[in-house]
Image (cartoon, rainbow, N blue to C red):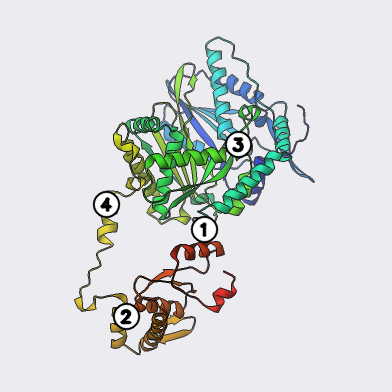
Amino acid sequence: MGNSLLPLLAAQSGIWYAQKLAVGEPLFRPGEYLEIHGPVDTLAFRAALQQAVDESETLRLKFLESADGPMQYVAPHVDADVHVADLSALPDPRTAAERWMNEDLGRVPDLLTERPFSFALFRLSADRHLWYHGYHHIVMDGFGAALFARRVAELYTAAVGGAAAAERRFGGIADLLLEEKEYDCSDRFGQDEEFWRRERDADPAREHGNWPPLAAASDFERFTTTVPADVAAALRTLSADLDVSLSRLLIGLTGRHLQATSGTRCAAMELPVTARTTPLARSTPAMMMNGVPLTLTLPPGITLPELLRHTADRVRNVLPHQRFRGEFLRRAGGLRPVVNVMTFDYSLTFGGHPVTAHNISKRRIEGLSISAYTRTADGPLLVDFDVNRGLLEADEPAAQPQRLVRVLEQAAELAGTAEHTSFPVDGLDVLSAGERSLVLEDWNDTALADAAGAGQVVERFEAWAARTPDAVAVSCGGRELTYRELAADVDRLAGHLQARGAGPERLVAVALPRSPELLTALLAVLKSGAAYVPVDPGYPAERIAGVLADAAPHAVLTCREVLDADT
């Protein structure tokens, strides 16, 4: 193609500027190593790797900055430059190899002067080798890396077998740019934009789970667990019993985990997608992946088949619109846990020797990323929890993978039974026996040593006010109320509410900011015999309207400050 200057793909552009803002931070370094269970001919491997690079334009990209922004061109040749090391004499060769790989992934290449990829081949023993391939996301995503790895395996296997490899033509960057431009100018783009606008407006999770983004890669930590092969096999059987794909089953069950641990009736997540909707895109190693929001609704009593049908319908609904860039969607929808389910077959062979893939990516983790993947059609299921520790309690990250695995194991037990057709999703418990005992017994051990102090909230408040009438009961923003003053305010407001019909079996909504008046209102509602409905004045107006419509309160207690805020 020569040195024709080309703009960046939309996915590349987002990464370019994000990396510019995070100088030196390895936020966009996907990588893995393939464990080859057999001997490797180093010369044949080098030749196969070089040919695959020659065939792939994305690995021959060079970047430069211009007055029109970042640009790229395809160099005619780039040296594959594989690092080869024999570690077989070391006491722990795998650890030494992984240390080298992690150090490489922790380094950010200068995109203007350095290759945006790294290769290494480590010899652990005569019949055990590790091929590491790491990239900068600006040139490669996971789908593209799998295409590239498969081509290297094809070329190597043909070479050591003395045969000619089948010809393969990867797509080119200019062709991808042309398809992208055609999409951006098409009716399809407008339809996708309108679809996502409607999704956003109707999303029940809009007010939930918008964690503040954290960019520091150092906060990222991975917790990996393995779902045994027999449990994974049972999940495959269950997916067949329920006529749903394994990936949809895993997305739905992960949704149950998120819903149970968030305390809401929906599971909001971001779903990574390939964004490859054309034959050209599906045949091109490059950076094209996208992320789209997905919300599952789990009302009380929903059964497992109902959840999985709902999951399949929701995924089927959003996938046709996956080309619309997720960067625009995240601006409007906030931060969500990323749920990445990869069930594609990665059963490569090198010269007839099987491989096991190990993911070691370093990525930007703003909150929580859950990756569930299988590498063979009948093997175990691996689950990675990548966590930004700044958002969770110290003991939470290590416990979360086991809670998801607990859900998967309970679902697996339903395979082949009649119960799977009507099992309630609420019955899939995320808590261990110890955690359940802690919640139901230890935290609920509220017996009082002083029986005289027992009683209803208002009775206990009034008893305390009688004992210490001049003590400070409330202090807020420089204001103070004694128990005597607070009790008098409560009595007045409770009488006012009762005079207007508040009482048992009636609801009173309380929409007040944190203040002495809020405490007065809550106690007064209880003293009137009614129950209160807390309404956060900080909620969006639509959310408040929905709460009030559902609760249909007898009265609403609020203040001028809230009314003037147009909520």
Q: Quadrant of the C terminus?
A: bottom right
Of marks 3 and 1, the one in the foreground = 1
Report the Cα–Cα distance between label 2 and label 3.
60 Å
* Residue at disc 3, secondary structure: loop
Image side of residue 454 versus residue 72, left or right: left
Relative image position of residue 371 (x, y in whole percent): 46, 40
Residue located 60% across and 54% down the image: 332
Image side of residue 415 versus residue 206, left or right: left
- Residue under circle 1? 207
- Residue under circle 2? 461
Residue located 63% across and 28% down the image: 284
Report the Cα–Cα distance between label 2 and label 1.
34 Å
Q: Where residue 434 is drawn, which disc sits there?
A: 4
Q: Earlier in the sequence, mark 3 or mark 1?
A: 1
The amino acid type found where label 1 is placed reads Glu
Image side of residue 231 versus residue 121, left or right: left
- Structural crowding at the residue carrying mark 3, measured as other residues with C-alpha within 10 Å and reported as few (<14), some (14–19) or many (≥20): many
Residue located 55% across and 52% down the image: 202
